[in-house]
């Protein structure tokens, strides 16, 4: 970390145990590395089936309107419409007057509507021949919007939405071709709805680590947002603490949109209310930021009992203990 960063922050470049530490490359090992024998092909994975119908690639994007083919499939459009419905329900369920500033009870009314209609909403996305999967997939949608008892929201709920999308991938509703739109169209729209929920009903952060946490509510958009910025011609990690750079570029970059939301919701110096992010701004490249965030997500979310104790498993996302290899 450069000396210009806030005092008391963690040094990302020098602490080997920190998720943003990358060990130096061992060039000598590369030189001594022996030539390996070609790996035998697995006929079930590496060889294209004889019945595959190959075609000569051709252009499909001829005009600007044709970009819709690239950006969104029909399933993506339906998922965005589903999220638009959740957004509309917020407008139809205004907060109520109550003594407590946080955790507006109107959220429970909003959630009750989702609880009742979740399977119908998911059925609009899932084809009729896969209708049997709807009840299982709908559970993850209901789990992804916060807790109606505590009126809070956190990374566990965010993980449930990722599981919801994963289930749709596993049953074939979403395809490999949709992967970019899944993140930057569907998940981004989900973020917009969640932020509206958080602001409208003054939801509490679930399991927040305070100033030492990455963010009160989200984590995944920082991972995907940093990957979006890898090899950017001029935006570097140090720029996301620059108000001008954030204001000019937040609409195009998920990471910067997250930073903007934080600055809108919190007051005071950035280094004080978001110390982890402030320290990350000293990391020299977006690729290192991305790698470190993935390691941090595994350690701080996926391996934490308070988060995973609420995660639900079924036939699409089963829990199978790892068998030790002999």
Image (cartoon, rainbow, N blue to C red):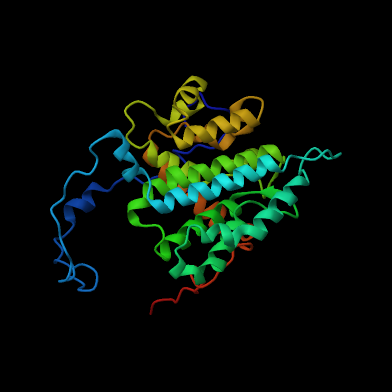
Q: Considering depth in this image, is 22 or 213 the residue closer to the camera?
A: 213
Q: Which residue lies furthest to the top in this view?
A: 244
> Is 278 placed above or below 80 here?
above
Identify the residue shown where x is 17% and y is 55%.
32
Question: Going by the image, does 74 lie left or right of 146?
Answer: left
> x%, y% of residue 235?
39, 27
Residue 275 is left or right of residue 20, and the answer is right
On-image quarter of the C terminus: bottom left
Residue 239, percent from left and from top: 45, 26
Q: Residue at x 57, y 27 (%)?
A: 6
Find residue 161 and report its horizontal and vertical position in percent.
54, 54
At x 75%, y 55%, the residue is 149
Q: Nearer the viewer, residue 52 or 205?
A: 52
Relative depth, front residue between 131 and 252: 131
Specify whether residue 255 is in view. Answer: yes
Q: Is residue 146 above or below residue 195?
A: below
Q: Nearer the viewer, residue 89 or 140?
A: 89
Tell me residue 33's x, y (percent). 18, 57
Residue 209 located left or right of residue 300: right
């Amino acid at each position: 970390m450069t000396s210009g960063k806030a005092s008391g922050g963690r040094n990302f470049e020098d602490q080997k145990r920190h998720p943003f530490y990358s060990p130096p490359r061992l060039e000598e090992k590369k030189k001594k590395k022996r030539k390996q024998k070609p790996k035998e092909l697995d006929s079930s994975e590496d060889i294209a089936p004889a019945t595959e119908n190959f075609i000569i690639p051709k252009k499909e994007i001829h005009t600007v309107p044709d970009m819709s083919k690239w950006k969104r499939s029909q399933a993506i459009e339906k998922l965005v419409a589903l999220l638009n419905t959740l957004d509309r329900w917020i407008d139809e369920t205004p907060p109520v007057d109550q003594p407590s500033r946080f955790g507006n009870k109107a959220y429970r009314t909003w959630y009750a509507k989702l609880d009742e209609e979740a399977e119908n909403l998911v059925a609009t996305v899932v084809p009729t021949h896969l209708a049997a999967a709807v009840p299982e997939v709908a559970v993850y949608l209901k789990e992804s919007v916060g807790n109606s008892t505590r009126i809070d929201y956190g990374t566990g709920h965010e993980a449930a939405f990722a599981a919801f999308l994963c289930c749709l991938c596993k049953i074939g509703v979403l395809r490999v071709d949709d992967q970019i739109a899944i993140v930057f169209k569907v998940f981004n729209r989900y973020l917009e709805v969640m932020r509206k929920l958080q602001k409208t009903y003054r939801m509490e952060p679930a399991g927040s680590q305070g100033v030492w946490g990455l963010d009160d509510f989200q984590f995944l958009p920082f991972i995907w947002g940093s990957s979006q910025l890898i090899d950017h011609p001029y935006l570097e990690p140090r720029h996301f603490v620059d108000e001008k750079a954030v204001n000019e570029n937040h609409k195009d970059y998920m990471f910067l949109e997250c930073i903007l939301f934080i600055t809108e919701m919190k007051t005071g110096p950035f280094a004080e209310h978001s110390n982890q992010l402030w320290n990350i701004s000293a990391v020299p490249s977006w690729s290192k930021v991305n790698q470190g965030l993935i390691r941090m997500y595994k350690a701080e979310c996926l391996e934490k009992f308070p988060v995973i104790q609420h995660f639900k498993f079924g036939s699409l996302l089963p829990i199978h203990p790892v068998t030790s290899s002999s």
